[in-house]
Image: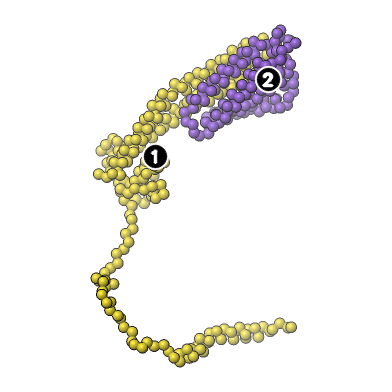
Chain colours: A purple, B yellow
């Protein structure tokens, strides 16, 4: 079913969303382990592995390429990405003790997440138009 | 050539041993034909101008003093004595010295490093009920502040972890929504996904707000810690300056 005046999902967008979710889940898993939340740590690690397997296998990605995507939905999608990016950037300045394992982990995670958010947002606003 | 017989070998070894043993005896007569002798009999020559007030051997030797561990001695990291108990931490603390019951080592840290000093356990400036700002009291106060500070930092870090978790959940909801809704309902189901994602982002922002609200308390505790450490340095200075 095509969305009138909409766009099509591109391979770049699908892969960048997959990378964002794999990176995010793996990072949260590590941070949860550092904070002592083993259960959530394991859950997010499992999510990261499943998403990674799906992305690498490629079957689902191939089926999604070219599917319709509404421009309005993509704008909301980018807005949520923007809010998450602002949240993470704000949180980076609130870390009290810049020592120990948490700070470098959080720093690497946040920088990576922000880069992937920017890439995903860029792919979302550059979707090819549906014909 | 046939190897020599074993009896000949034994004989030769016995001959060599005997020769070595008897050689000094055999040659002794040769070297004593002209024995050395002094032209004059040996005697003690008295000093021309004796400068030694007392003859050697008339006074008892003074032993080199061996330093003993006692109150009022300063040390550094490399020379400090070992302690069997430790109150405080590596920067500020005290402990009883091994094999010296009642003698304590106290230490503080400043910009020049850690300084150590020995104290009598009964000294009122060190501990006891005579005053409420003795060294041990100040160490207790600092330990309490350090614990409070660590607890607040842990609390902030928990908010940080929860914020990141909510943010990633929001990304998951919106990411899956963006990919799946287009396939299943042509984008119509995207709205509930967006609401869910925005709720998660709101929760994440609330965690940031909670962490930020703890910042003034953290700053206050850091100020208290600085004051506690300044007090300890002052007390240490008074201890090492003596009564």
Front one among B117 and B155:
B117
Front one among A123 and B153:
A123
Determine crowd level at label 2: few under 14, some 14-19, many 20+ residues with C-alpha closer than 10 A.
many
Determine crowd level at label 1: few under 14, some 14-19, many 20+ residues with C-alpha closer than 10 A.
few
- Locate the C terminus of chain B by quadrant: top left
Which type of secondary structure does the marked residue at label 2 adopt? helix
Along the horizontal axis of the image, is B133 left or right of B17?
Answer: left
Find residue B15 and report its horizontal and vertical position in percent: 59, 86
Q: Residue at x 38, y 47 (%)?
A: B76
Find residue A9 and report its horizontal and vertical position in percent: 70, 16
What is the CA distance from the residue labelled 2 to the residue labelled 1?
Answer: 54 Å
Query: Mark 1, chain letter?
Result: B
Residue at the spot of label 2: A13
Along the horizontal axis of the image, is A45 left or right of B32?
Answer: right
Q: Nearer the viewer, mark 2 or mark 1?
A: 1
Q: Which residue is drawn at 57% across and 26% down?
A: A110
Residue at the spot of label 1: B111
A101 above or below A91?
A: below
């Amino acid at each position: 079913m095509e969305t009138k005046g909409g766009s099509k999902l591109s391979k770049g967008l699908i892969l960048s969303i997959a990378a964002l979710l794999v990176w995010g889940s793996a990072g949260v898993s590590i941070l949860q382990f550092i904070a002592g939340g083993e259960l959530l740590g394991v859950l997010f690690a499992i999510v990261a592995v499943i998403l990674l397997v799906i992305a690498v296998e490629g079957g689902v990605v191939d089926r999604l390429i070219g599917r319709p995507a509404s421009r309005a939905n993509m704008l909301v999608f980018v807005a949520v990405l923007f809010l998450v990016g602002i949240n993470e950037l704000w949180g980076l300045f609130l870390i009290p003790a810049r020592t120990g394992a948490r700070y470098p982990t959080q720093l690497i995670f946040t920088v990576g997440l922000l880069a992937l958010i920017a890439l995903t947002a860029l792919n979302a606003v550059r979707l090819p138009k549906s014909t | 050539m046939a190897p020599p017989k074993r009896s000949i070998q034994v004989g030769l070894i016995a001959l060599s041993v005997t020769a070595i043993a008897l050689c000094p005896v055999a040659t002794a007569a040769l070297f004593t034909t002209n024995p050395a002798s002094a032209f004059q009999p040996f005697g003690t020559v008295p000093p021309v101008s004796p400068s030694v007030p007392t003859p050697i051997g008339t006074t008892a030797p003074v032993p080199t003093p061996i330093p003993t561990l006692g109150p009022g001695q300063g040390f550094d990291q490399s020379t400090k004595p070992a302690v069997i108990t430790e109150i405080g931490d590596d920067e500020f603390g005290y402990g009883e010295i091994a094999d010296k019951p009642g003698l304590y080592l106290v230490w503080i840290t400043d910009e020049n490093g850690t300084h150590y000093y020995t104290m009598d356990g009964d000294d009122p400036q060190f501990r006891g009920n005579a005053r409420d700002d003795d060294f041990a009291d100040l160490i207790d106060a600092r330990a309490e502040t350090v614990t409070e500070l660590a607890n607040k930092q842990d609390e902030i870090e928990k908010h940080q972890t929860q914020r990141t978790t909510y943010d990633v959940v929001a990304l998951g909801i919106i990411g899956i929504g963006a990919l799946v809704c287009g396939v299943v309902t042509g984008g119509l189901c995207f709205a509930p996904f967006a609401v869910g994602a925005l709720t998660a982002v709101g929760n994440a922002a609330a965690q940031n707000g909670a962490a930020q609200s703890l910042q003034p308390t953290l700053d206050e505790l850091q100020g208290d810690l600085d004051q506690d450490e300044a007090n300890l340095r002052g007390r240490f200075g008074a201890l090492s300056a003596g009564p």
